[in-house]
Image: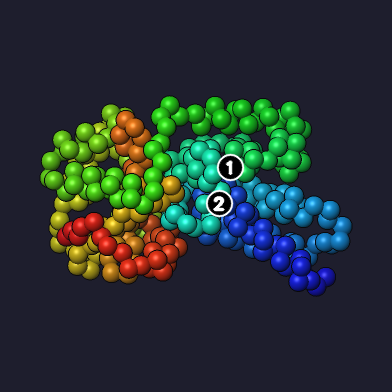
Amino acid sequence: MLLRTYEADLFESSRGRLEAIAYRLLGSAGDAEDAVQDTFLRWHAADRERIETPEAWLTKVLTNICLNQLTSARARRETYVGQWLPEPVLAGDRMLGPADTAEQRESVSLAMLVLMEKLSPNERAVYVLREAFGYAHREIAEILDLTESNCQQIHRRAKQHLTTDRARAEVDAAAARKVVEGFLAAALSGDTEPLIRLLTDDAVSVADGGARARARRTPVIGALGIARYLRGLFRPGPAKRAYVGGSAALHAAVVNGAPAVLIAGGERILGVMCLAATPDGVEAIHIQVNPDKLERITRQWAAAGPHRPVTEIW
């Protein structure tokens, strides 16, 4: 059945919401776009005259596509080289979706996306639809073909798994730059003490290089260990200059709602260091250097330029 103009417009008006749901479920902007495109193809092939509530139908189809991808993704990540981290997304990207409430903002932070990897696919879907998009349990139950009481139980269980004791600081571009400037001043000082003071005692640093970039394959835990690790990471050397092609510009940005260091070599973003800042200090550093997961943020950063770096190194 040919897609009429109003039916195409209806889908396009839902695209941003669908992408935001899919990104939270999959942790990958590329996979989210693919899931939304698959949803469009099913919308195109469907008997649309018989669909009473298009928004609910599209959400159900998309969610089930994502659930199938999550199941296969778990198998792929068992053979993933090193640590797996989500794809970082710049502030303003529609993948981030609604950010009116603390729950919506938290649901798309890199720290929360990492935690959600521990949930079952159904737990993740219930949590995302309820916390980030405000769906009623009755609506979620219809989307996932569950009973409403079962949906409520899954939601409670998911929240218990994702409970965190520390509230993360909310940041805008100016606040992010201030955090990044302080972080880089400490990291480039050549001394571990300034960094230790910025980190919580139980801080953790995780890096993702996949099979395409060098990255530490195990997490670093504790302020002292992370401070020593970062001191070495930022120390100049010929291998680093050769990899970057000269010097690297260090920029401040807001990524997934948190302050972040963007490491740029020419027109490329070579790495993203996302800082999970809390009132007690930085509790986590997520370092993404897998080139496959930096393509989107490179395009967006270039489109939004020019940018003033905080400093240059190497």
Q: Position of residue 197 (x, y in %)?
A: 21, 33
The answer to whether mark 1 and mark 2 are in CB contact below 8 A is yes
Dot 1: element: helix
Classify residue 41 as left or right of residue 304: right
Work out whether residue 308 or residue 51 is closer to the camera in this orientation and state it: 308
What label does residue 132 carry, if any?
1
220 to 10, vertically: above or below: above
Badge 2 density bin: few <14, some 14–19, many ≥20, Cα 10 Å: many
Q: Is residue 218 visible?
A: no
In the picture, the quarter occupied by the C terminus is bottom left
Kindly identify the residue that appears in the image at 54 percent across and 27 percent down. 160
Coloration of the structure image: rainbow
Query: Image point 43% across, 47% down: which residue?
Result: 257
Q: Name the spot of residue 30 as percent of width and height, x first.
A: 52, 60
In the rendered image, the vertical position of residue 5 relative to residue 114, given as above or below: below
Of 106 and 2, nearer the camera is 106
